[in-house]
Amino acid sequence: MSSSPLSKKRRLSGTETKTGSHCSSSNSVRTDLSHTPANGMAKNGNDAEIDEGLYSRQLYVLGHDAMKRMQNSSVLVSGMRGLGVEIAKNVILGGVKSVTVHDQGDAEWRDLSSQFYIREEDLGQNRAEVSQPHLAELNNYVSVTAYTGELTEDYLTKFQVVVLTNSTLDEQQRLGEFCHTKEIKLVVADTRGLFGQLFCDFGEEMVVYDTNGEQPLSAMISMITKDSAGVVTCLDEARHGFESGDHVTFTEVQGMTELNGCQPVEIKVLGPYTFSICDTTGFSDYIRGGIVTQVKMAKKISFKSICTSMAEPEFMLTDFAKFDHPGQLHAGFQAIHAFQKKHSRLPAPWSQADGEELLTLAKEVNSAQTGSAKVEQLNEALIKKMAYVAAGDLSPINAFIGGVAAQEVMKASTGKFMPVMQWLYFDALECLSEGDDVMLTEEECSPRNCRYDGQIAVFGTKLQDMLANQRYFLVGAGAIGCELLKNFAMIGLASGNGEVIVTDMDTIEKSNLNRQFLFRPSDVTKMKSDTAAAAVKKMNPSINITGHQNRVGPDTEKVYDDDFFESLDGVANALDNVDARMYMDRRCVYYRKPLLESGTLGTKGNVQVVIPFLTESYSSSQDPPEKSIPICTLKNFPNAIEHTLQWARDEFEGLFKQSPENAMQYLTDPKFMERTLKLPGAQPVEVLEAVYKTLVTDCPHSWADCVAWARNHWQCQYSNNIRQLLHNFPPQQLTSSGAPFWSGPKRCPHPLEFSTSNELHMDYVVAGANLFAQTYGLPGSTDRAGVVKILQDVKVPIFSPRSGVKIHVSDQELQNSNSSVDDSKLEELKSQLPLPEAFQLESIFFQAENYDIPPADRHKSKLIAGKIIPAIATTTSAVVGLVCLELIKIVQGHKKLESYKNGFMNLALPFFGFSEPIAAPKHKYYEIDWTLWDRFEVTGLQPNGEEMTLRQFLDYFKNEHKLEITMLSQGVSMLYSFFMPAAKLKERLDLPMTEIVTKVSKKKLGKHVKALVFELCCNDLSDEDVEVPYVRYTIR
């Protein structure tokens, strides 16, 4: 029930963690990781192999080449307040060579509002030294060092990437100019209360190898013209998806063979199925076929230095509704630096005088500008708000800017994805109280010497008290769950009389550690929810948190019942599947609770906020269904690696999972046969044939039988079936229209000949035989010489293609042929199957290991066949930052739709899009408006103590709401309909409603059920159908 998690607990056998600036002459401290720790994670280095077990999800985002480049990068992160530690955390999890964390300041109270590795007992100690041991635990492949000295130019030459946070403008400019001349890549990141700033300078000759991270597109060709700009037409099965300026290459073109294997050619898109290429007049005539594939071309981009860019800034827009904010904030941040330089402090929280002074400084900064940085008119209210909140330090803002900044560090290290060009500004002013005239006082927001001072500076003490008493349900403790819990702890959610309940039924795996940062290697196999709860309790001992191991769903409604949901203030989803999300969405709509929904996919992330009576729900809109591959394409006409991988997955499941499971159910479940015979189409025959083969014809008695089965299965799949296919459709066959049958998406196959000297053939037989043996509880063997010896005695039947064998060319043909079941074949199978009680159960043993054996080509096939979701810590961090900004609005009780923000981002491009949530759609009956949040409330218990009957229920709606109920249902049970037989209606009319529900559903109502949900179909007084809300029928 995770979303994409990140965490781990280090076990460093024989390692001492040294903290203290006296450890070396350079004022630095590091953790010695030169040995290989007990968890099997070796120290990183230039020649280190990539640990696919740890980095598996991230590898699907970055790829092996980018990961290897990143493993050679040394990164400096200066400033270990909340933003700096967030960036360092994400970069370390990513897997660079080394990270040096730098700070010359000591921990103070206001740091605790977002610096999750500083405890109260650390106050007064150097921030970098305190943070270093915790950061070093995140990834044992990354050397983490603390440095507390001056940042000299000589010191910076050790690094490929330098990140400056919490630094002065003078320092940014001085070090920035030096980095630019020395080709050291620079990231400057800063947050001030509800405002964030990011600047990138990756040099004048930065090479980007992949601008968007998407898989290269490919399409099948139907025609290429001979022209000065040859026109390529693709098959009209699907749009080619290319853009003008893309580069492509060609393979398998017949006739115009000059294109095959050519250098990448730039294209110009003419339409969804056509594009033009180079001059093809001198090429041979095109005959048929061909595949065109997009080629990722390296792109060189040039950055300006920080001083040049400040005067002539290029802005990356984060919110199109605030298109004028970047220029304003550009001047505002410079004014804050000027204020700080003048007073050696930040503007005091909500100080009117400091606000006026910052505005004056901003005007001075703006009037001094000569380049494009000069804005025509300063937004005075915006600049003053910057002054009011500049002393704040908010965990959600740091999470968002920190996630984006860490991704920029990775871009600088790898050349993967398009960097931010060059300034990014962000604000979340909607988090402040609604209404422009609402002003907090200096007294409300002054420091209290408590861990929430950085947050009180922005919102005052009132919000802090409200946060402390919130009761929230977090569903999932994976990557998003871990990040949410960290932010909950930092902002003080449930730190008073409130509580956070987190549930996740998963245990921690090694691959989680790359993203789920609350876990360590020693936590592997432990429960996620308990481990995460314990970890955040260390970050903020005041948080009240309880871990559960329950899956959310109908099965756990006894636990998460009416009392539970009614006690909540809200729900946060951190789930990895749509079904669970939709279930929680339905629960939140029913109990009228706010829902925070988010998700990630590689560098893409989204946030949706669901507010009762205000917005639509998560289920109100759905993504289009994923495109599925036709069965006939998979079986007989594959044309892409995705097809063969999906076929292999289906083959594996059919042989080693579904067939053994069905056979075991046949032996142990008396109702298996009854259920199977009710299956639609040809499925009963297919299932029983597979059971018969599993228990009778294919049942092995020795290892030699298993080898023989694997050898014959290979022969059947890769030789006999192909020969039969070519018998039915010979290579030169023409269709009824005279076109070649084997053309377009149909690639003509050829049968393979088995050879014991072919390593791949032997791999297949050895793996297949072992899987088959394990399925039946027989001992296997990896002795290849022994297998070869057995194969010499295996008799492979001679195959001759048969006439009259039907091979379906389309799924429609297949469907039509499956519409009728051969009853005689079914009866024959039923009679041939051994009686379950007569079959020795001991002779067949299904091991769970059969279901999780990794495929041979682990990386590629896991992604496609395993439907793995790519994931990276940076996206998770940024997304959760946005989620928690919405949480702050919910807790304050914001009522305006425009105050809330749904967000989408793609850090690879980079792209950010924010929008108001969609209002809950309105419906109407008579003159009454209603939305999905409305319902009829009906109390089942009458004043006389008796429960309402069906007759009374129908009369109630007729009298009270002028509605005639035509159909009434509860779940899948039909309780009443106007076309119901008279006898049945008479029987039900005077029965209590709960009795009818129990009778029809054949299920008893649990004691935890306080109310039932009824769905209605109604007519109004004019006998017209009307759409009406559901009914909440209270029974207790």
Image (cartoon, rainbow, N blue to C red):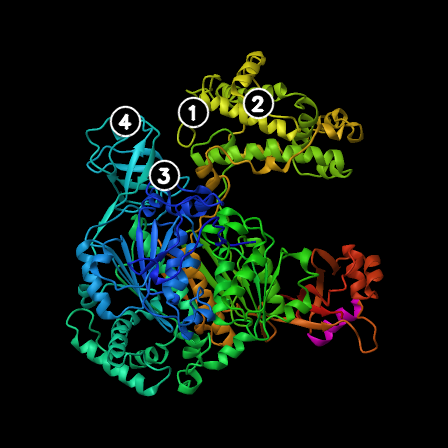
The three-letter amino acid code for the residue at tag 4 is Thr
The three-letter amino acid code for the residue at tag 2 is Ala
Tag on residue 748? 1
Q: Which residues are magenta?
A: 950-961
Quarter-wise, where is residue 264 in the image? top left
Q: Which residue is mark 2?
A: 710
Foreground pick, 370 / 510 = 510
At 68% from the left edge and 69% from the top edge, which residue is drawn? 563
Nearest to N terminus: mark 4 or mark 3: 3
Label 1, secondary structure: give it.
Answer: loop
Decide: few, some or many residues near mark 4? Use Cα within 10 Å; few <14, some 14-19, many ≥20. some
The percent coordinates of residue 788 (x first, y second) are: 53, 16
Decide: few, some or many residues near mark 2? Use Cα within 10 Å; few <14, some 14-19, many ≥20. many
Taking the image as drawn, is residue 304 in sight? no
At 43% from the left edge and 20% from the top edge, which residue is drawn? 731
The majority secondary structure of the magenta stretch comes to helix
- Give the left or right position of residue 809, taking residue 82 as reference: right
Q: Which residue is mark 4?
A: 257
